[in-house]
Amino acid sequence: MTRELHDAIVSMTALMEEESEQLARSARVPELPEIASAKLRLAGKIENEVARLGRETPDWIETLDDELRAELADASQALRDASLVNAQVLKRQIELSVEMMEAIAAEAKRLTGTRNATYGARGALGGIDAPAPISINTRL
């Protein structure tokens, strides 16, 4: 009954650990979309299994034998730990991407000189700093 839940939790933990390890080694991880998709499927499976168990047996946690309860608790703790590490690694990757995009935009703006001046109705010049157009090549 809870074996499927346990297996999904263990699989999610392993997947998060693998993703964190790959992102820590290299900023470019071609398998990232597949990993994210697998994480979504496993999260859905875990959520569905917990909901099913709750519908069928509202006190299912209390009815588990001690060994299975300990296994489920250990797996849940490992998932929590892997989630914390994974969240930090992903947060840092996002921050690096934002910083890189800001640096690229600043350099493009500097090179293209996008500062424009317009002559107003009262004879005054007004300056506008328009953002530089940026194109991203995702096939690096």
Image (tube, grey):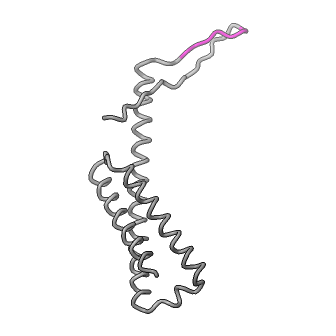
Q: What percent of the width, then of the height, locates residue 104?
A: 40, 31
Name the foreground residue: 98 vs 2: 2
Q: Is residue 62 magenta?
A: no
Residue 30 lies left or right of residue 73; in this view the side is left
Magenta extent: 116-122
134 shown above or below 26: above
The residue lying furthest to the left in this view is: 25
- The quadrant in which residue 101 appears is top left
Q: What percent of the width, then of the height, locates residue 18?
A: 31, 61
Quarter the C terminus occupies: top left
Residue 44 lies left or right of residue 23; in this view the side is right
Q: What percent of the width, then of the height, locates residue 111?
A: 40, 20
Q: Residue at x 37, y 55 (%)?
A: 35
Name the foreground residue: 84 vs 8: 8
Q: Residue at x 42, y 65 (%)?
A: 83
Q: What percent of the width, then of the height, locates residue 22?
A: 29, 55
Q: Residue at x 47, y 64 (%)?
A: 43
Total of numbered circles in the picture?
Answer: 0
116 shown above or below 44: above
50 shown above or below 42: below
Q: Residue at x 58, y 20 (%)?
A: 128
